């Protein structure tokens, strides 16, 4: 569901209602920094930071970013440095504290289950954020948008407070290169005082039974799978075979993209189905095919407890009620070259005029491409950055066409958009193909809660 849409408030509510509530781990370092600058008006973040295992580290984050009463209206957020392969210690500390705070608040004062979700392709900040989540006692780790082969080992080592290395995807890397993101918990806090941590269950998010089988047999301890089809929101796996587009410019998926559920059953591990399954009939069908249940994204993304800016959420729900809400699978929007589902909303990056009027920039960098420079070091480029900068770094101009700054856009979706000279960063809203199915929940109302979602899905199953 993007950045901070599946917030601690939403995950906590789902968890207390007896299901697995999952927080988004993406960009939590910037999310925490900007929330603190908004003043933490209810004190929740400061309460979480007070529970962090090392108060000096947490106080350092507060000193850098907390603004009592919130930053002045009309002023920009203080920037957070972009992660690199060798980040500064205080950037790793911020990420660790952010992972801890989000999970701590989602788990606070109840016994329900809480998970955290990461995109495998967003590699650089992940070990530090994950370590923070482990310190807070997270119950499940879910990883998709790539091949999460390295995460079982990452979990094993981080629960023992050991240093880890995460091999990096670097374009042009040679077989002799050793590019990795390294994280040592001892750089952040005195780990010799800490007992080993509980290892969470690891669920790999996959789009094929072949990948699931490979991970189950050769990828360390995998506890289950989320099987995601191309109708799910956010980034989708590209279609198999040559890319074909339909009359509206969307990728065409076919029989080769359907997951072989018989093979999934043969693996002997639990799996959940994701993508237009969030109906009572969808749950029944999933269980009939051997699934343990379903993963629900879109219905929760637009409920009262989600992190989406309330005004923006109301506009999307108005489109649902009117029957005009539209989701487009955009093959160009994401700098990652993965198809990305975009809700069409005036004034957001889906609006051609708003997109054309935004100055290109890259100052968050989560979706940057890492590439090998001629001197053997890592360079960083993004197809959504200023075109001249991208070309100077060896990029292809054709790759810049239609690319959108998903990082800044998703922060704008949850009310954390940066203020620029030309205005606040426009949002980009993602949802699954089943967005209009929310109408069944509204039934004449203008909004609904997480409890309404669960009641709708469970009372008839």
Image (cartoon, helix red, strand yellow):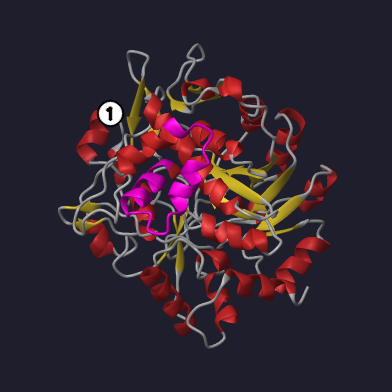
Q: Is residue 365 magenta?
A: no
Up the image or down, 345 lies above or below 132; here it is: below
> Residue, x 25% and y 53% (percent of image)?
71
Of all residues, the one furthest to the left in this rendering is 421
Is residue 442 among the parts visible in the rendering?
Answer: yes
- Residue linked to disc 1: 393
Residue 146 occupies which quadrant of the picture? top right
Q: Quick one: 431 or 117, which is closer to the camera?
A: 117
Q: Is residue 421 left or right of residue 448?
A: left
Which secondary structure class fits the magenta region best?
A: helix
Up the image or down, 14 lies above or below 54; here it is: below
Is residue 237 among the parts visible in the rendering?
Answer: no
Q: Is residue 286 left or right of residue 143?
A: right
Q: What element does badge 1 sit on?
A: loop
Up the image or down, 444 lies above or below 66; here it is: below
Q: Position of residue 91 (x, y in %)?
A: 38, 31
> Residue, x 55% and y 80% (percent of image)?
439
Callout 1: few (<14), some (14-19), or many (20+) C-alpha neighbours within 10 Å? Answer: some
Q: Quick one: 71 or 238, which is closer to the camera?
A: 71
Q: Is residue 24 left or right of residue 57?
A: right
Q: Position of residue 454 (x, y in %)?
A: 66, 70
Q: Which residues are magenta?
A: 29-56
Q: Position of residue 402 (x, y in %)?
A: 32, 52
């Amino acid at each position: 569901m993007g950045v901070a849409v599946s917030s601690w408030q939403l995950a906590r509510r789902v968890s207390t209602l007896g299901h697995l509530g999952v927080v988004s781990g993406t960009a939590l370092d910037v999310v925490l920094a900007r929330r603190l600058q908004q003043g933490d008006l209810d004190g929740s973040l400061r309460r979480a930071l007070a529970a962090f295992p090392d108060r000096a580290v947490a106080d350092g984050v507060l000193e850098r970013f907390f603004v009592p009463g919130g930053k002045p209206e009309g002023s920009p957020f203080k920037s957070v440095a972009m992660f690199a392969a060798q980040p500064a210690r205080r950037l790793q500390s911020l990420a660790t504290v952010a992972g801890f705070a989000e999970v701590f608040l989602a788990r606070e004062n109840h016994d329900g289950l809480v998970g955290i979700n990461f995109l495998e392709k967003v590699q650089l900040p992940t070990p530090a954020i994950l370590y923070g989540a482990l310190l807070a006692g997270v119950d499940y780790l879910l990883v998709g948008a790539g091949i999460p082969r390295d995460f079982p080992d990452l979990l094993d080592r981080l629960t023992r407070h050991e240093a880890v290395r995460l091999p990096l995807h670097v374009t042009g890397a040679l077989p002799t290169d050793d590019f990795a993101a390294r994280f040592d918990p001892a750089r952040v806090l005195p780990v010799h005082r800490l007992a080993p941590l509980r290892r969470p269950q690891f669920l790999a998010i996959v789009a094929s039974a072949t990948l699931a089988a490979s991970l189950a047999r050769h990828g360390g301890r995998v506890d289950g799978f989320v099987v995601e089809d191309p109708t799910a929101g956010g980034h989708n796996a590209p279609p198999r075979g040559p890319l074909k587009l339909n009359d509206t410019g969307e990728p065409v998926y076919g029989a080769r993209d359907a997951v072989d559920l018989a093979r999934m059953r043969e693996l002997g591990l639990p799996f959940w189905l994701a993508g237009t399954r969030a109906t009572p009939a969808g749950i029944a069908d999933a269980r009939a095919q051997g699934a343990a249940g379903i993963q629900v994204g879109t219905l929760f993304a637009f409920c009262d407890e989600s992190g989406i800016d309330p005004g923006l959420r109301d506009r999307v729900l108005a489109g649902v009620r009117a029957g005009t809400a539209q989701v487009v699978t955009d093959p160009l929007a994401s700098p990652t070259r993965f198809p990305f589902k975009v809700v069409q909303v005036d004034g957001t990056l889906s609006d051609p005029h708003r997109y054309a009027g935004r100055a290109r920039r890259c100052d968050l960098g989560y979706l940057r491409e890492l590439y090998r420079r001629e001197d053997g070091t890592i360079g960083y480029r993004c197809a959504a950055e200023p075109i001249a900068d991208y070309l100077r770094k060896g990029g292809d101009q054709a790759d810049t066409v239609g690319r959108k700054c998903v990082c800044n856009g998703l922060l704008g979706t949850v009310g954390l958009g940066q203020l620029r000279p030309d205005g606040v960063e426009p949002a980009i809203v993602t949802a699954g193909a089943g967005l209009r199915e929310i109408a069944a929940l509204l039934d004449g109302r203008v909004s609904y809660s997480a409890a309404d979602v669960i009641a709708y899905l469970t009372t008839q199953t």
